[in-house]
Amino acid sequence: MSKPQSSPKVTLESLPDLLNNDNKVKVAGVDIDGILRGKLMSKDKFLSIARDGLGFCSVIFGWDMHDQTYFRELKISNEGNGYRDILAIPDLSSFRRIPWEGHVPFFLLSFFEPDTRKPVSACSRGLLKTVVDKWEKNGLKAMAGAEYEFHQYKVPVVPSVPTTEANSSSTAKFLVENPVDSLTPITEGMFGYSLTRPLHNQDYYYGIFETCKTFNCGIESWHTESGPGVFEAALEYGEIKQMGDKAALFKYVAKSLGIKFGITPCFMAKPRQGLPGNSGHMHVSIVDNSGKNLFYRGSKDPNPKFPDLAYLSDMGRHFLAGLLDGLPDVMPMFAPTVNSYKRLVENLWAPVTISWGLEHREAAIRLISPPNASAKATRLEVRVGGADANPFLVLAAILALGRRGVEKKMEIKVPPLGKGGLDGSKYHQDVRSAKSLKEANNQFIRKDSVAREVFGDEFVEHFGGTREHEIKLWDEAVTDWEVRRYIETV
């Protein structure tokens, strides 16, 4: 059985001893889509840049997830500035060893402007840290947990691809010439919480659990979800910056072990029509330096504005109000792709309104508190995001909107979502979530957007520009559905 890697405090002085028996190091940073981009380097090279960082090509913020440069050049990286280098500094506290690659040392990078040493505005890891720092200056700490659902498909046999490369790359090759429905899930049918379905892929199933534990992105609970070949992982609750790292690294583990086992994990929000999508729920609370949960009221409020709020503290209420007020303006951070909005539809276990409710799984924000949970477990579960979202951006958005609500002492204006049925919009006459990335992005980039207020113009212009690129590609695409529907009849 694997054991979690010990986490001694790593310093510049201790690095040589830590890496004494190694000759190489792997490093990676996170791009705007939440994808790890990195390289392998010699130990000597790594030791030489550990203090002051290394130049890293800014193009990782100048192209999309398929390495196509953005149609509209953005400020950070473009042809005009020669796709300049930015400064990448390893975060020594992120040290791990990669269990499936011979325990090679691994560090996460954060990106900075070379001249000012300020975080690059598009560095999502840096954005989350900036928001967290504002809370910590007041002696407060944010805690978080992440849940991911994802589909998994057997890697198809492609005659032109060697069997030694039967991995996600051959899946991509297969889809060039075959419809998506030709992919075979690792198990068939709907069987959530099954004790027997994981046995069909036992080594893979247990391998992910044990590897995550060893790689310090441990899984708290792990089970099948309702859908063909769908698993759900709840990651171990912890400090919010570490949760961002763990969420990104969990996907790295799943994809890496998938390659080993001939399985393609799929974190897109809605892989199949007519089935529930893949969610990326985030649980958040605020604690003081002693660890006391500041969302818990301490005792029941005898006269709350809404009964659901009876055990939620004033801070928790302001935080929730800030989320409800700002969510419509930051939706692309929770739902960043064209496909994201195929998940956010009625009757398929996804929130469609900007809503909240005590223990309500149809609401955008589920309040978890006494009497349904213990006082120390009082928290908000933000259910809007899909598994396709960048976890750093999602967590930064939650924390920034919540802080805005606390600072402005915002009040919750809408009642909790009524219970009954899976179509939330029927039971709640409130703001409907954006129905497309174009609609969401237009609200995100508008001049008086809450996003500009909490994150600044530079980030909004960059991220909004990247979404405009995604929208343009979609607008120009001719889909299989269109051809099948119109090829003969029109």
Image (spheres, rainbow, N blue to C red):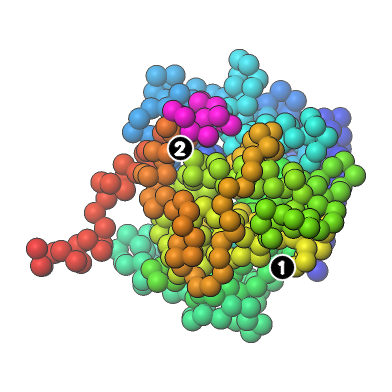
Residue 212 makes an appearance in the image: no
**Near-viewer residue (57 or 363):** 363
**Near-viewer residue (258 or 463):** 463
**Residue on which the image places disc 1:** 221
Helix, strand or loop under label 2: helix
Q: Residue furthest front?
A: 303
Give above or below for 209 relative to 329.
below
Dividing the picture into quarters, in which one does residue 274 lie?
bottom left
Helix, strand or loop under label 1: strand
Residue 421 percent across, percent down from the top left: 50, 73
Dividing the image into 4 quarters, which one contains the N terminus? Answer: bottom right
**Near-viewer residue (366 or 207):** 366
Category of crowding for the residue at label 1, using alpha-carbon neighbours closer than 10 angstroms: few (below 14), some (14–19), many (at least 20): few
| Three-letter amino acid code at the position of disc 1 | Ser
Residue 455 lies in the magenta-colored region: yes
| Three-letter amino acid code at the position of disc 2 | Phe
